[in-house]
Every structure is written in C-alpha cells, then in structure tokens.
Amino acid sequence: MMKRHYEKVIVGCCFAFIFVNIGLASTAFSVHQPYLVAMEGIGDTGGSLVLSARTFTSFVAMLVVDRYYALLDARRGVFVACLCTAAGFAIYSTATSLPQFIGGAIALGIGYGFGGLVAMTMLVNRWFASGIGSAMGVATMGSGVASIVMPLVVVRVIEASSLSAAFLVEAAVALVVGLAAVLLLRNRPSDMGMEAYAGPAGKTRKRARHELRPCPRSDQALLLVAMLLLGAYCCGGVTYLSVLATSSGFEPVFAASLVALAGVALTAAKFATGELFDHLGTPLASAIVFALGAIGFSLCCFAGTGSTAVMLAAAVLVGVGLSLGSVGISVWSLDTADPSATTRQVKNFQVAYALGGFLANTLPGIVKD
C-alpha cells in the first residue's frame, strides 16, 4: 500500500526539508534575534551581519544549485543540505563570538540555497503527472508551519534551559529530517518500478489541459524581470506590515497580530493556490491570486483611517498574495521551461526572485524617510 502511494511519502519528505531548510533557517529564525543581539560582542550590527551572511550565502548557492543536483541528484543533495542546516545550528549552539555566528550563518545559507524550493520542484515534477500544484502547495506549507510552531518551541526551550539548548534542538530536528530524506526519498518513480502519479482513472485534474508550452527564448528575459519584481513584492511585505500599523497609530500588540494573521493566511493559501493552479490552469489562477494580493496591499494605503477591519482584511489578502512567491514560482518554472532544462529554469527564477527581494528590502525605509 505504501509503495502504491509513494508519491505521498515524497510530498511528506518535501514538506519536512522545506520546514527545516527554509522554515528553521529563515522564516522562524526571527524569534532568536532579540536573544542574539543581546549577547556581548554581537549587538544590532552583529545581528544584521549574521542575517546578511546567511542571505548572501544562500544567494550564491542558488547560482550553482542546478550543477549541485546534476552532481548529487535529489536524494543525496537534500541529505547534504539538511546536514549543512544541522551543522549551522550546532555551530550556533557553541558560538560565543561574532565570527563563529557568521560561520553558522554560512552553513545555514548553504542548506537554504541547496535544500529548498529547487529540490522540491524537481521531485514533485518527477513524481506527479497531474495534481502538481496541489502537491507543491502542501510541500511549501512546511516553512509556514515552522513559522507558527517553532517560535513557541524555541522560546519555551530558552526559558527552561538556554539559547544554546534551543539551537541544539533545531540541529537535531534538521539531522533527523536529513536522515529521513536519505532513507525515504527516491529520485524518480522508476527507481521503485513505478510511474508518476496521474490521479484516479477518469479523474485527472484539469491542469493537464491548461499547461503552457515552453516559453520562447525571446521572452525569458521578461520572465526573469517578472520574478525580480515578484521578489520585491513578496520579500519583506509581511515584515513592513507591522511597521505600517504602528506608525499609523495602532497598538504594537495589534501590529504583531497582523503579522501572525498574514503568516497563517499565507500558510493556508499555499495549499489553496496549488489547488487553483490544478483546477483553473496557470494563467487564470495566477491572475486571481495576484488580484487578491493587490487588493490587500491597496487596503494598506488606508491604514491611516484607523480601521481595524481594513487592516485585518489587508493582512489576510496580503498573506494570500504572497503565496505566489513559493507555489507560483515553482509552477511557472515548470510551465515555461524546456523539459530538458527544468532545474535550470527553477534556479533562474529563484535567483531573480531572491535578487528582487534583496534590492527592495531597503526601499520602504528610504521612501518613508
């Protein structure tokens, strides 16, 4: 029975390594920041340098991720990436100086760059002939679940023991997921004498009739510009939501709740967006989710009215729109790539997206000032 439905095991593994390599390393890491900057010799500047080291390293790793998986393939590649994440947290647990924390950040950046959406997209594309969007939606929920669950766990461990103990717990989780990946992941269905999942007979999802043809080379540059702008749209959007709320006169507690609400909406929207891609096709589903996100950001313009209802609606819709930064990129890369170069297309999209986020993260403060 397990072998017959092994594609579900693959999605479960993808969820787990997204939880570890993106969720623990990035999405949920902000809970450590106050404790980190309070350490002697670190401070706010050191905390920023640690985050910058991880971000820069992950960006560099993304530049060569297609060659990485051509060398190791998915099973071993994900395992090594999880080991890097585990090593990063282990280094953090023993670190007492800024250079040591930067060393841990570099290891986490490698795990993030090599063990994230590129690996997930590659595996889902191999194991699913239909229902690809839904599978990606479930897999990418891993980082969202980490952002909801891990801050609570980390704070309790820190209060009961220490920051070092919390880092060790996260290192252990990453190690367990890495071992599970090498034991359970299979690079292709043919490795188990199977074929890609095509759904129940007569119930193949509509997505098969909506798939796009490979995008002409003349349009590839335009697609990369689109990914660059999407990175600017998605990266930091939720973070600046709290700044907008407090600067508009809302209480800090309410501002924090907006961020949490947007995070929950984003997590749920990843699955819903995948379903839309499967049932409505890529163009229409993309337009709907883009429109909802645009409405959410438009509502943010009315923060000055002091309306609680407007800000709550904005947080939910912004969270929904941000789901395109994970599920959308993965689906678009498959729909527009030459079948022989899907990994390279996913990499190019991810690099452009990350660059857009990096360039745009400084703009809100500059514009406000």
Image (cartoon, grey):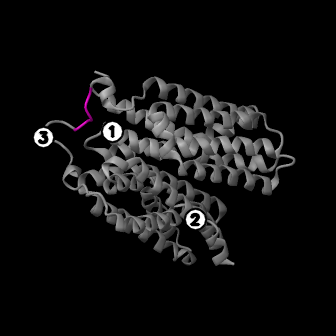
State the CA–CA distance, disc 1 to disc 2. 37 Å
User: Percent x, y for residue 116?
Assistant: 50, 44
Q: What residue type is labelled 3?
A: Gly
State the CA–CA distance, disc 2 to disc 3. 45 Å
Chief SS of the magenta region: loop
Q: Mark 1 points at which residue?
A: 126
State the CA–CA distance, disc 1 to disc 3. 21 Å
User: Percent x, y for residue 311?
Assistant: 51, 67
Residue 299 among those drawn in magenta: no
Q: Is residue 216 above or below residue 264?
A: below
Location of the C terminus by quadrant is bottom right
Instruction: Give the residue furthest to the top.
Output: 1
Residue 159 visible in the picture: no
User: Percent x, y for residue 219?
Assistant: 36, 67
Q: Mark 2 points at which residue?
A: 241
Q: Residues within 10 Å of mark 1 (few under 14, many from 20)?
A: some
Residue 149 placement: quadrant: top right
In the image: residue 91, left or right of residue 355: right
Residue 135 visible in the picture: yes
Q: Residue at x 74, y 34 (%)?
A: 93
Q: Residue at x 68, y 36 (%)?
A: 89
Residue 202, which numbered label? Answer: 3
Q: Give the range drawn in magenta.
A: 194-198
Q: Is residue 173 above or below residue 364?
A: above
Q: Which residue is drawn at 38% across and 30% down?
A: 9
